[in-house]
Image (tube, rainbow, N blue to C red):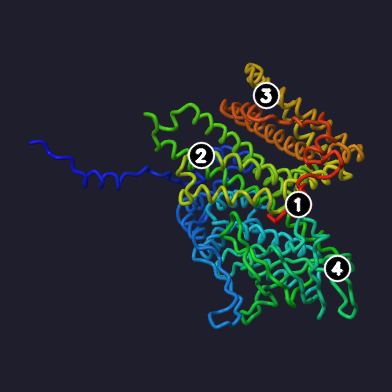
Amino acid sequence: MSQKFNTSEYLDYLRNLHQEGPHLGNQYLEDQALQDYIKDFVPEKILKTVETQKKGLIELGQAAAGPLQAAADDCELTPPRLQLADAFGKKNNQLAVGWGWKEQKQFAARFHVVGSAYVEGQGLEPYQRFLQSVRMFLYHPSSGMFGCPLAMTDGCAYVLSNLLKDPNLNQKVRQKVQKTFNHLTSNDPQQFWTSGQWMTEKRGGSDVGATTETIAIQYKENKFKLFGYKFFTSAADSEVTLALARIIDPNQNYSQDQIRKLPISMFLIKTHKKNGELNGIEYQSLKEKLGTRQVPTAELILNGAKATLLSPPGKGVKYIANMLQTTRLYNAATSVGFMRRVIAVCRDYCDRRSVFGKKLNNHPMQIKLLSDMEVTYRGNLIFFLKSSQLFSKVQAGVATQDEQNLQRIGSPLLKLFTAKELQFISSEGMEILGGIGYLENSKLPVLFRDGQVLPIWEGTTHVMAHDFHRAITQKNNPISSYSKYITQILVDNHGSRSKMEENSRAKEAIKITTLAYNQLIADINEIINNKTIYQKKYEYFMRDICFGASRIFSAVLLLEHYIKSGKQQDLEIFIRWVNIKPLYCPEKNMDLEQNCNLALDRQADGKLGGTGNFDPLGNPRPKF
């Protein structure tokens, strides 16, 4: 007698049926691109020491796939909470964070993510910032966005380290600065502090010179009380923060316009008093954001917050700008680190998932897409590593003038370029996992959402493009250093020239790169030599110029790596990078007036469509 079909067993089978999800291995050892490129920048002996030491790169790479990621998951599941009052109406103004956020702070201290950039006496000075940048890169994807306060912590430490070099610094201020610096760079979890960066106010934006309305009133030598409304304060749970304010005379009455014309100074605020109470700080709300929900970003009022004046009066913007070199590097570390994490997840998943009779990594279209993602990642990674090396030399005081120039013009390029390139990889990564990639608990949407802040944070793409323009128009002609570096690599191919001449695709790639570079430099020189033509023409294309300068620089870095390695795969990566997207092709022949009309929907009568308080029928246009 035949046995009946057992529906219970079949349902048990269906209940237990599942697709094996992606696994992560050691994020340092398994990253072949990093393993290849890092050797171009650090002597092997030093690298081996930093790799294998306690809390070194290998241990950090392992932690990133395990306990760090577990803490990051909790940061996402347990976002910060603001409790302004208890159940009985008593104001307590408390900010609560979850276990994962607290654990990330412990990890960051133990792995010396910030402080390793400032350790002295180990003979690592020319490489310290570079090696610390690699730590950042490994840490960020598993940080639960704790890398955000670390960026501001490092930025503050960098500002303070420069202040400590000033022999004229007031002695009491020096003691406070030194104590704060020691906490910010400590590898002891009990001593480690984080710092905020409280600049953005209600008028918002990067133009802090026009939007800062916080005032400072002196009550002792170098001691002030700050009054103002800070609109975006990331890392609101930090122990200290840098803040900008305008010093006023309390015995004089000012109009709002008069206050806005006063110069801006930079202050250091300790967020809590010795008794644990907030130092004249009143939380108003936590921001509801698309991503970075793990980060306590608050609106707050400074109501007599006691602060120490750090900059000379009226020089605050100049002094706080020093931290931008550091925070932009963190921004890029996050962008490139996220790229690597998405690729690692997708590559492993494609080896576990089978469709239409074979694994995903056996489908030609999937192979091509993974290759595109890897080439994109490698071009961005080598740009990030080169920029880290340049900043490392600048910080150590051993950079040549050409290296200083390259670092200055490369800083805004690195930030804007890597942030935008991430968007392609994070979107494609979700699609590779199909519907599962769209689910929150696949974790890829977290990387996708959090990555959206990177083109905005620390200055939008437009702000970076304006900064690049400022950099190239400086009197010491820094673009000549860029030109020198590019031409040396394109012309001087050493022993690899014969191999490339045998490869028609390589010859064509070098030709394309050279033509793009020549066009870029011609345009930049026209900008430098003619301010009027920049305003009338080239400002429209400044984004294109920045992306072109970035893509060409990455192309040359990939070519330089091939010249050093001699590996055929490295030559192929250079060729693919050159061909995967146009290096530089601004649409300079477009009709600017017609495109202004198109962009603004300008009508024949000069009115702008889709703007104002009333629609074409005279009806009120409701707020969005």
Q: Nearer the viewer, mark 2 or mark 3?
A: 2
Q: Are marks 1 and 3 in contact (CB under 8 Å)?
A: no
For mark 4, does the 10 Å Cα neighbourhood hold few (<14), some (14 to 19), or many (20 or more) residues?
some
Is 354 above or below relative to 173?
above
Q: Nearer the viewer, mark 2 or mark 4?
A: 2
| Residue 560 in the image, given as x and y percentages of width and height | 67, 32
Please give the name of the residue rendered at 62% of the width and 41% of the height, measured from the top-left corner.
381
For this rendering, which residue is in front, 557 or 394?
A: 557
First of labels 4, 3 by sequence position? 4
> In the rendered image, which quarter is residue 601 located in?
top right
Q: Which residue is mark 4?
A: 313
Is 456 above or below relative to 92?
above
| Cα distance between the residues tagged 4 and 3 | 53 Å
Badge 3 amino acid: Ala
| Residue 558 in the image, given as x and y percentages of width and height | 65, 33
Q: Secondary structure at mark 3?
A: helix
For this rendering, which residue is in front, 54 or 363?
A: 363
First of labels 2, 3 by sequence position? 2
Judge whether residue 187 can be spotted in this image: yes
| Cα distance between the residues tagged 2 and 3 | 30 Å
| Cα distance between the residues tagged 1 and 3 | 36 Å
Badge 2 amino acid: Glu
Horizontal relation, residue 558 to residue 482: left or right? left
| Cα distance between the residues tagged 2 and 4 | 53 Å
| Residue 602 in the image, given as x and y percentages of width and height | 82, 41
Q: Which residue is mark 2?
A: 431
